[in-house]
Image (spheres, grey):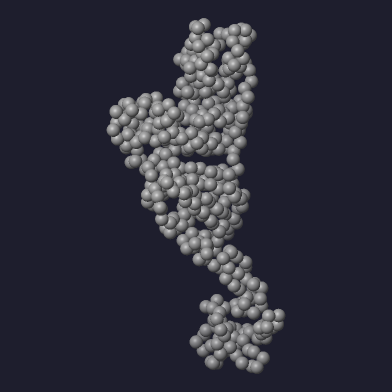
Amino acid sequence: MWLYLYFPMLQLEGMTKQTVSGDFVTPVVIIDGRKNQIVQLNDAAQQRGIKIGMGLGTACALCTQLHVLPYDDLLERQQLLEIANMLYQVSADIVIDEPNGLVLKVDSMLSLYHDLPSYWQVISGQLAQLGKSYYYGMGESTIMAKLLARERCNVLVLTPCQKRHYLRKIGLTRTSLDSRVIELLARTGVKNVAQLEQFALSELAKRFDTELVHYVGCLFGKLKETLNYFQPAETFELTAPLLYEVEVMAWLEKPIEHLLSRLALFLQQRNLVTRTLYFTLALRDKEALEITLNSAEPEYKAANWQRLLNLKLESITLDAPVQSVSLKVDALETQHATIKDLFSTQQSVMSAQGLRAILCAKLGEQAVQGLQLTGDPRPEKASTYSHKPCFTALDSKLRPNILFPKPQPLCERVNIISGPERIASGWWDGEPVQRDYFIVQNEQAQRLWVFREQNNHWYIHGVFS
């Protein structure tokens, strides 16, 4: 058995998700320019008397404030792939029927879900998360299920009598048969799909060509269909079409939020994380604006990416109105569990990687530098600035937080707490040092890091906080 899901409003509902509800008070229609017919419309347009299949001229006559959008089959296909990726988590065998249909093989899943109602409950639950309107039909072939779904059957189990009732209402023009074959069948009195069941395949083969024989055989499950099963993509790519052109960056918050929520769901279902997002803003009459967003540590949560992106967008100005926003992620990593102490008081403290990601998003990659250990024993050369993140742990030796750029002479009485620690190094670059370092405390109870040279002169090199 096969379950067909028909999504008649994919493009329009995809735009609805990117826009606040108040924007859809205006009547909106999507028109197929090749046929000059309306293929999708919202409730506001329907209330004005506009219908599917109506011409643009008639629709504009009924509503002077009609917002017209061109039909985009690529956007529909992308929405369809998003649904297929979602359903693939709960159903193994899926066939994509572009531009707005999916076919699910039911038989192989009943051993997992025990019965059809339980299987349908899981499928409908997944579809509810996406918020798409759909119709469905069940049949012994993908063709049968498709015809019933497009007839808006919405019944899982049909009796033979009920099935014939629906098939009688489906004319041959709604099938994929060639017009020449339909005309020949009409001459013999066959005008709907139900009447095809009365013919044996051997009888059809004598009077008609193989196209009709193959179609009828596949329709009623007598011949095996050739199907290409869906395989989920290894990368994430999604475009958010905009209902209106956007000229202010802040107005892109809704479509970007939608893209990030879909990305978070995609990563969470696969137990993956990523470090880099690629946004593309399609501009009117201008080259697309590319925005690369980096995170110092792997991330999947939409809220964390949104915070970084908001900082990044503060420094970007638009040269032209934005027509669509796309998000692509191709470098994915497996998520590893982070072990935290249940009784630790530092669980809410931001990590070093997280802080660096925020600073880079706000100031830019080149403006953020960190300390990197060089391995040189001399304290003034033990570290250097680097643009590359380096979170190497320091050794166990006690060192002051504040190190003077140039050692200062020690001119006060102090008490030695620990030491000496001898550092003799630098012979290879012409700047040799030989010092004995001590931790001392002065009369104001400050702890200092001092050293004594071979000539017995004492200097302060750092102060402990």
- Residue 83 in picture, x, y percent from top left: 52, 36
Residue drawn at 54 percent across, 67 percent down: 369
Residue found at the very far front of the displayed protein: 285
- Residue 376 in picture, x, y percent from top left: 66, 76
- Please, is residue 312 above or below residue 62 in the view? below
The N terminus lies in quadrant: top right
Residue drawn at 63 percent across, 17 percent down: 223
- Residue 246 in picture, x, y percent from top left: 38, 47
Q: Name the residue nearer the viewer: 193 or 440.
A: 193
- Please, is residue 196 above or below residue 282 in the view? above
- Residue 186 in picture, x, y percent from top left: 49, 9
Q: Could you tell whether 99 is left or right of 243 in the image? A: right
Q: How many labels were placed on the picture?
A: 0
| Residue 7 in sight here | yes
Residue found at the very far top of the displayed protein: 188
Q: Name the residue nearer the viewer: 128 or 430.
A: 430
Residue drawn at 52 percent across, 6 percent down: 188
- Please, is residue 326 above or below residue 453 in the view? above
Residue drawn at 60 percent across, 53 percent down: 337
| Residue 302 in sight here | no
Q: Which quarter of the picture shows residue 426?
A: bottom right
Q: Name the residue nearer the viewer: 351 or 266.
A: 266
- Please, is residue 95 above or below residue 460 in the view? above
